[in-house]
Amino acid sequence: MFDNLTFAHPWLLLMLALVPLMIVWYIARHKRIKAPIHIADTRMFGASVKTVRHTLYHARFVLRCIAVTMLVIALARPQSKLSREEMEVEGIDIVLAVDVSGSMKGEDFKPNRLEAAKEVAKRFIEGRKNDRIALVEFAGEAFTQTPLTIDHNILERQLSAMRIGLLEDGTAIGDGLATAINRIKESEAVSKVIILLTDGVNNRGSIDPETASELTGEYGIRLYTIGVGSRGDVLYRDEYGHATYMKSDLDEALLTRMAENTDGGHYYRATDKNSLNEIFEQIDKIEKTRIDVTQYQQTREEFKLFLLLALLALGLELLLRIDN
Protein backbone atom coordinates (compact mmCIF):
# COMPACT_ATOMS: atom_id res chain seq x y z
CA MET A 1 0.00 0.00 0.00
CA PHE A 2 2.86 2.39 0.84
CA ASP A 3 6.00 2.82 -1.26
CA ASN A 4 9.32 2.99 0.64
CA LEU A 5 7.63 3.35 4.06
CA THR A 6 9.93 4.83 6.73
CA PHE A 7 9.43 6.31 10.21
CA ALA A 8 10.49 9.73 11.51
CA HIS A 9 10.73 8.33 15.09
CA PRO A 10 11.35 4.58 14.67
CA TRP A 11 12.42 4.16 18.33
CA LEU A 12 8.78 4.71 19.39
CA LEU A 13 7.92 1.40 17.72
CA LEU A 14 9.46 -0.28 20.79
CA MET A 15 6.22 0.65 22.54
CA LEU A 16 4.53 -2.08 20.48
CA ALA A 17 5.93 -4.45 23.08
CA LEU A 18 3.05 -3.23 25.28
CA VAL A 19 0.57 -5.18 23.15
CA PRO A 20 1.82 -8.71 23.99
CA LEU A 21 2.09 -7.62 27.67
CA MET A 22 -1.55 -6.51 27.54
CA ILE A 23 -2.54 -9.88 26.10
CA VAL A 24 -0.69 -11.80 28.84
CA TRP A 25 -2.29 -9.59 31.54
CA TYR A 26 -5.76 -10.04 30.05
CA ILE A 27 -5.50 -13.85 29.90
CA ALA A 28 -4.18 -14.04 33.48
CA ARG A 29 -6.91 -11.70 34.78
CA HIS A 30 -9.63 -13.61 32.94
CA LYS A 31 -8.53 -16.89 34.53
CA ARG A 32 -8.36 -15.32 37.99
CA ILE A 33 -11.90 -13.91 38.00
CA LYS A 34 -13.47 -16.99 36.47
CA ALA A 35 -14.38 -18.78 39.79
CA PRO A 36 -16.11 -22.20 39.64
CA ILE A 37 -19.77 -22.38 40.77
CA HIS A 38 -21.23 -25.77 41.81
CA ILE A 39 -24.93 -26.18 41.00
CA ALA A 40 -26.89 -29.36 41.68
CA ASP A 41 -29.38 -28.86 38.89
CA THR A 42 -29.08 -26.40 35.99
CA ARG A 43 -32.53 -27.04 34.55
CA MET A 44 -33.96 -24.08 36.49
CA PHE A 45 -31.88 -21.67 34.41
CA GLY A 46 -33.34 -22.88 31.15
CA ALA A 47 -31.73 -21.80 27.92
CA SER A 48 -29.67 -18.69 28.52
CA VAL A 49 -29.96 -15.95 25.94
CA LYS A 50 -26.68 -14.34 24.86
CA THR A 51 -26.77 -10.72 23.81
CA VAL A 52 -24.50 -9.22 21.17
CA ARG A 53 -22.54 -7.63 24.01
CA HIS A 54 -21.89 -11.07 25.56
CA THR A 55 -21.05 -12.61 22.22
CA LEU A 56 -18.51 -9.86 21.55
CA TYR A 57 -17.19 -9.84 25.12
CA HIS A 58 -13.55 -10.36 24.07
CA ALA A 59 -13.91 -8.12 21.01
CA ARG A 60 -13.53 -5.05 23.25
CA PHE A 61 -10.06 -6.16 24.28
CA VAL A 62 -9.11 -6.98 20.68
CA LEU A 63 -10.21 -3.50 19.63
CA ARG A 64 -8.19 -1.99 22.48
CA CYS A 65 -5.07 -3.83 21.28
CA ILE A 66 -5.68 -2.64 17.73
CA ALA A 67 -6.12 0.93 18.97
CA VAL A 68 -2.84 0.84 20.91
CA THR A 69 -0.99 -0.65 17.94
CA MET A 70 -2.32 1.96 15.50
CA LEU A 71 -1.64 4.79 17.99
CA VAL A 72 1.99 3.73 18.50
CA ILE A 73 2.53 3.53 14.72
CA ALA A 74 0.97 6.98 14.30
CA LEU A 75 3.26 8.43 17.00
CA ALA A 76 6.28 7.00 15.16
CA ARG A 77 5.24 9.15 12.17
CA PRO A 78 5.20 6.79 9.18
CA GLN A 79 6.27 8.44 5.94
CA SER A 80 6.24 7.29 2.32
CA LYS A 81 8.85 8.56 -0.10
CA LEU A 82 7.71 9.24 -3.64
CA SER A 83 10.53 9.39 -6.16
CA ARG A 84 10.62 10.36 -9.82
CA GLU A 85 13.38 10.23 -12.41
CA GLU A 86 13.81 12.36 -15.49
CA MET A 87 16.16 11.04 -18.17
CA GLU A 88 17.91 12.95 -20.89
CA VAL A 89 18.93 10.55 -23.64
CA GLU A 90 21.56 11.45 -26.19
CA GLY A 91 20.21 9.28 -29.00
CA ILE A 92 22.30 7.10 -31.27
CA ASP A 93 20.87 5.85 -34.56
CA ILE A 94 22.42 2.66 -35.91
CA VAL A 95 22.03 0.81 -39.21
CA LEU A 96 23.09 -2.84 -39.42
CA ALA A 97 23.95 -3.74 -43.02
CA VAL A 98 24.35 -7.52 -43.31
CA ASP A 99 25.65 -9.54 -46.27
CA VAL A 100 23.22 -12.35 -47.21
CA SER A 101 25.08 -13.62 -50.28
CA GLY A 102 25.60 -17.33 -50.92
CA SER A 103 29.10 -17.29 -49.41
CA MET A 104 27.53 -16.56 -45.99
CA LYS A 105 26.68 -20.29 -45.91
CA GLY A 106 30.30 -20.94 -44.94
CA GLU A 107 30.47 -23.28 -41.95
CA ASP A 108 33.65 -21.93 -40.40
CA PHE A 109 31.11 -20.22 -38.08
CA LYS A 110 28.56 -22.49 -36.44
CA PRO A 111 26.03 -23.28 -37.78
CA ASN A 112 27.09 -20.94 -40.61
CA ARG A 113 28.30 -17.36 -41.06
CA LEU A 114 24.87 -15.77 -41.47
CA GLU A 115 23.21 -17.55 -38.55
CA ALA A 116 26.17 -16.74 -36.29
CA ALA A 117 26.02 -13.08 -37.36
CA LYS A 118 22.26 -12.97 -36.66
CA GLU A 119 22.72 -14.44 -33.20
CA VAL A 120 25.47 -11.96 -32.25
CA ALA A 121 23.56 -9.02 -33.76
CA LYS A 122 20.46 -9.99 -31.76
CA ARG A 123 22.41 -9.75 -28.49
CA PHE A 124 23.80 -6.40 -29.62
CA ILE A 125 20.29 -5.08 -30.32
CA GLU A 126 19.01 -6.27 -26.93
CA GLY A 127 21.67 -4.16 -25.23
CA ARG A 128 20.76 -0.93 -27.11
CA LYS A 129 17.39 -0.22 -25.49
CA ASN A 130 17.57 3.57 -25.94
CA ASP A 131 18.69 3.60 -29.59
CA ARG A 132 16.85 3.49 -32.89
CA ILE A 133 18.17 0.74 -35.15
CA ALA A 134 17.56 -0.10 -38.80
CA LEU A 135 18.30 -3.29 -40.69
CA VAL A 136 19.61 -3.53 -44.29
CA GLU A 137 20.49 -6.72 -46.14
CA PHE A 138 22.45 -6.99 -49.33
CA ALA A 139 23.76 -9.58 -51.77
CA GLY A 140 23.77 -8.76 -55.53
CA GLU A 141 21.27 -6.04 -54.63
CA ALA A 142 20.35 -4.21 -51.42
CA PHE A 143 17.09 -4.07 -49.51
CA THR A 144 15.86 -2.28 -46.35
CA GLN A 145 14.50 -4.95 -44.05
CA THR A 146 13.50 -2.51 -41.26
CA PRO A 147 13.73 1.30 -41.15
CA LEU A 148 14.99 3.08 -38.02
CA THR A 149 12.84 1.99 -35.11
CA ILE A 150 12.87 1.87 -31.31
CA ASP A 151 10.62 -1.21 -31.43
CA HIS A 152 13.31 -3.82 -31.01
CA ASN A 153 10.80 -6.70 -30.96
CA ILE A 154 9.93 -6.03 -34.60
CA LEU A 155 13.61 -5.55 -35.39
CA GLU A 156 14.57 -8.91 -33.89
CA ARG A 157 11.76 -10.69 -35.76
CA GLN A 158 12.97 -9.19 -39.06
CA LEU A 159 16.54 -10.15 -38.22
CA SER A 160 15.45 -13.75 -37.62
CA ALA A 161 13.64 -13.73 -40.98
CA MET A 162 16.85 -12.97 -42.93
CA ARG A 163 17.57 -15.75 -45.43
CA ILE A 164 20.15 -16.52 -48.09
CA GLY A 165 18.68 -16.77 -51.57
CA LEU A 166 15.88 -14.21 -51.29
CA LEU A 167 17.98 -11.57 -53.07
CA GLU A 168 19.93 -11.89 -56.31
CA ASP A 169 23.28 -13.48 -55.47
CA GLY A 170 26.55 -11.59 -55.48
CA THR A 171 28.22 -9.05 -53.19
CA ALA A 172 27.23 -5.43 -53.82
CA ILE A 173 29.00 -3.79 -50.88
CA GLY A 174 28.62 -0.28 -52.34
CA ASP A 175 24.87 -0.70 -52.86
CA GLY A 176 24.46 -2.11 -49.36
CA LEU A 177 26.27 0.87 -47.83
CA ALA A 178 24.36 3.39 -50.00
CA THR A 179 21.04 1.89 -48.88
CA ALA A 180 22.16 2.15 -45.26
CA ILE A 181 23.13 5.80 -45.79
CA ASN A 182 19.67 6.58 -47.19
CA ARG A 183 18.11 5.10 -44.07
CA ILE A 184 20.08 7.32 -41.66
CA LYS A 185 21.29 10.46 -43.47
CA GLU A 186 18.20 12.54 -42.50
CA SER A 187 18.42 11.47 -38.87
CA GLU A 188 18.66 14.23 -36.26
CA ALA A 189 20.42 11.95 -33.77
CA VAL A 190 23.59 13.27 -32.15
CA SER A 191 25.47 10.18 -33.26
CA LYS A 192 24.87 8.18 -36.47
CA VAL A 193 26.50 4.80 -37.03
CA ILE A 194 26.56 2.15 -39.75
CA ILE A 195 27.86 -1.35 -39.04
CA LEU A 196 28.52 -3.19 -42.30
CA LEU A 197 29.22 -6.93 -42.16
CA THR A 198 30.41 -8.91 -45.19
CA ASP A 199 32.50 -11.96 -46.07
CA GLY A 200 33.34 -11.27 -49.70
CA VAL A 201 34.73 -9.07 -52.44
CA ASN A 202 32.64 -6.39 -54.10
CA ASN A 203 31.59 -7.91 -57.43
CA ARG A 204 28.12 -6.50 -58.13
CA GLY A 205 26.12 -3.32 -57.87
CA SER A 206 26.20 0.13 -59.43
CA ILE A 207 27.84 2.09 -56.62
CA ASP A 208 31.56 2.02 -55.82
CA PRO A 209 32.10 1.06 -52.14
CA GLU A 210 34.80 3.71 -51.55
CA THR A 211 32.64 6.43 -53.07
CA ALA A 212 29.79 5.36 -50.80
CA SER A 213 32.10 5.45 -47.77
CA GLU A 214 33.22 8.98 -48.64
CA LEU A 215 29.56 9.99 -48.75
CA THR A 216 29.14 8.38 -45.34
CA GLY A 217 31.83 10.66 -43.94
CA GLU A 218 30.24 13.75 -45.51
CA TYR A 219 26.97 13.01 -43.71
CA GLY A 220 28.79 12.71 -40.39
CA ILE A 221 28.10 8.99 -40.16
CA ARG A 222 30.65 6.73 -38.50
CA LEU A 223 31.29 3.44 -40.32
CA TYR A 224 32.41 0.18 -38.74
CA THR A 225 33.21 -2.54 -41.27
CA ILE A 226 33.43 -6.18 -40.21
CA GLY A 227 35.01 -8.84 -42.39
CA VAL A 228 33.90 -12.38 -41.47
CA GLY A 229 35.55 -15.64 -42.46
CA SER A 230 38.46 -17.80 -41.44
CA ARG A 231 41.60 -17.91 -43.53
CA GLY A 232 42.03 -20.84 -45.87
CA ASP A 233 39.51 -23.34 -47.25
CA VAL A 234 35.96 -23.21 -45.89
CA LEU A 235 33.22 -25.87 -45.99
CA TYR A 236 30.04 -24.94 -47.89
CA ARG A 237 26.85 -26.96 -48.45
CA ASP A 238 24.32 -26.42 -51.21
CA GLU A 239 20.54 -26.76 -50.80
CA TYR A 240 20.86 -30.51 -51.36
CA GLY A 241 23.43 -30.93 -48.60
CA HIS A 242 26.37 -31.56 -50.95
CA ALA A 243 29.61 -30.39 -49.33
CA THR A 244 32.44 -28.57 -51.06
CA TYR A 245 35.48 -26.58 -49.92
CA MET A 246 36.24 -23.10 -51.21
CA LYS A 247 38.92 -20.60 -50.36
CA SER A 248 37.70 -17.72 -48.19
CA ASP A 249 37.80 -14.50 -50.19
CA LEU A 250 37.72 -11.15 -48.38
CA ASP A 251 38.89 -7.71 -49.50
CA GLU A 252 40.27 -6.43 -46.19
CA ALA A 253 42.12 -3.54 -47.80
CA LEU A 254 38.87 -2.15 -49.23
CA LEU A 255 36.97 -2.54 -45.95
CA THR A 256 39.80 -0.82 -44.06
CA ARG A 257 39.83 2.16 -46.45
CA MET A 258 36.04 2.44 -46.26
CA ALA A 259 36.07 2.65 -42.47
CA GLU A 260 38.95 5.13 -42.44
CA ASN A 261 37.01 7.47 -44.74
CA THR A 262 34.73 8.24 -41.78
CA ASP A 263 35.61 10.02 -38.52
CA GLY A 264 36.23 7.38 -35.85
CA GLY A 265 35.45 4.47 -38.17
CA HIS A 266 37.28 1.15 -37.83
CA TYR A 267 37.69 -2.19 -39.62
CA TYR A 268 37.45 -5.48 -37.70
CA ARG A 269 38.21 -9.05 -38.77
CA ALA A 270 36.21 -11.94 -37.30
CA THR A 271 37.56 -15.42 -37.90
CA ASP A 272 35.06 -17.27 -35.70
CA LYS A 273 31.88 -16.70 -33.71
CA ASN A 274 33.73 -15.75 -30.51
CA SER A 275 35.79 -13.05 -32.20
CA LEU A 276 32.65 -11.73 -33.92
CA ASN A 277 30.95 -11.47 -30.55
CA GLU A 278 33.96 -9.62 -29.12
CA ILE A 279 33.84 -7.12 -32.01
CA PHE A 280 30.20 -6.28 -31.35
CA GLU A 281 30.99 -5.92 -27.64
CA GLN A 282 33.78 -3.44 -28.49
CA ILE A 283 31.46 -1.40 -30.70
CA ASP A 284 28.81 -1.51 -27.99
CA LYS A 285 31.26 -0.02 -25.48
CA ILE A 286 32.40 2.69 -27.88
CA GLU A 287 28.90 3.73 -28.92
CA LYS A 288 27.32 4.16 -25.50
CA THR A 289 24.17 6.21 -25.18
CA ARG A 290 24.61 9.02 -22.65
CA ILE A 291 21.84 9.25 -20.08
CA ASP A 292 21.55 12.13 -17.59
CA VAL A 293 19.29 11.20 -14.70
CA THR A 294 17.70 13.80 -12.42
CA GLN A 295 16.04 12.41 -9.28
CA TYR A 296 13.16 14.01 -7.41
CA GLN A 297 12.02 12.77 -4.00
CA GLN A 298 8.97 13.82 -2.01
CA THR A 299 8.13 12.74 1.55
CA ARG A 300 4.48 12.29 2.50
CA GLU A 301 3.19 11.87 6.08
CA GLU A 302 1.07 8.74 6.50
CA PHE A 303 0.24 8.89 10.25
CA LYS A 304 -3.30 10.21 9.68
CA LEU A 305 -4.60 6.86 8.45
CA PHE A 306 -3.18 4.99 11.47
CA LEU A 307 -4.55 7.64 13.86
CA LEU A 308 -7.98 7.32 12.24
CA LEU A 309 -7.87 3.52 12.63
CA ALA A 310 -6.92 3.94 16.32
CA LEU A 311 -9.85 6.29 16.94
CA LEU A 312 -12.20 3.98 15.06
CA ALA A 313 -11.14 1.00 17.17
CA LEU A 314 -11.58 3.02 20.41
CA GLY A 315 -15.01 4.20 19.27
CA LEU A 316 -16.15 0.64 18.58
CA GLU A 317 -14.89 -0.46 21.97
CA LEU A 318 -16.90 2.31 23.70
CA LEU A 319 -20.04 1.27 21.78
CA LEU A 320 -19.64 -2.32 22.99
CA ARG A 321 -19.40 -1.06 26.59
CA ILE A 322 -22.84 0.49 26.43
CA ASP A 323 -25.43 -1.80 28.02
CA ASN A 324 -28.15 -3.03 25.75
Image (tube, rainbow, N blue to C red):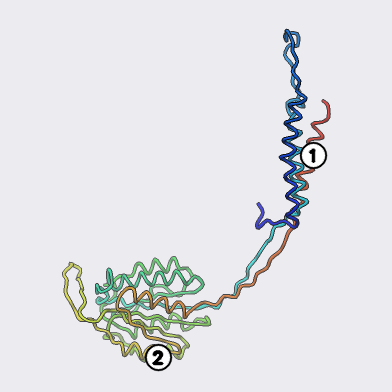
Q: Is residue 132 left or right of residue 113?
A: right
Helix, strand or loop for disc 1: helix
Q: Earlier in the sequence, mark 2 or mark 1?
A: 2
- Quadrant containing the C terminus is top right
Calculate the distance from the C-alpha at mark 2 to the C-alpha at mark 1: 81 Å
Q: Using a 10 Å C-alpha cutoff, classify the residue at mark 2 as few (fewer than 14 neighbours), some (14 to 19) or many (20 or more).
A: many
Q: Amino acid at mark 2?
A: Glu
- Closer-to-camera residue (163/250): 250
**Position of residue 247 measured from the top left corner of the image (x, y, whole percent):** 20, 81
Residue 56 drawn above or below residue 184: above
Return the residue at label 1. Answer: 314
Return the residue at label 2. Answer: 260
Residue 154 drawn above or below residue 201: above
Q: Quadrant of residue 159?
A: bottom left
Q: Is residue 128 left or right of residue 35?
A: left
Q: Amino acid at mark 1?
A: Leu
**Position of residue 273 measured from the top left corner of the image (x, y, whole percent):** 32, 73
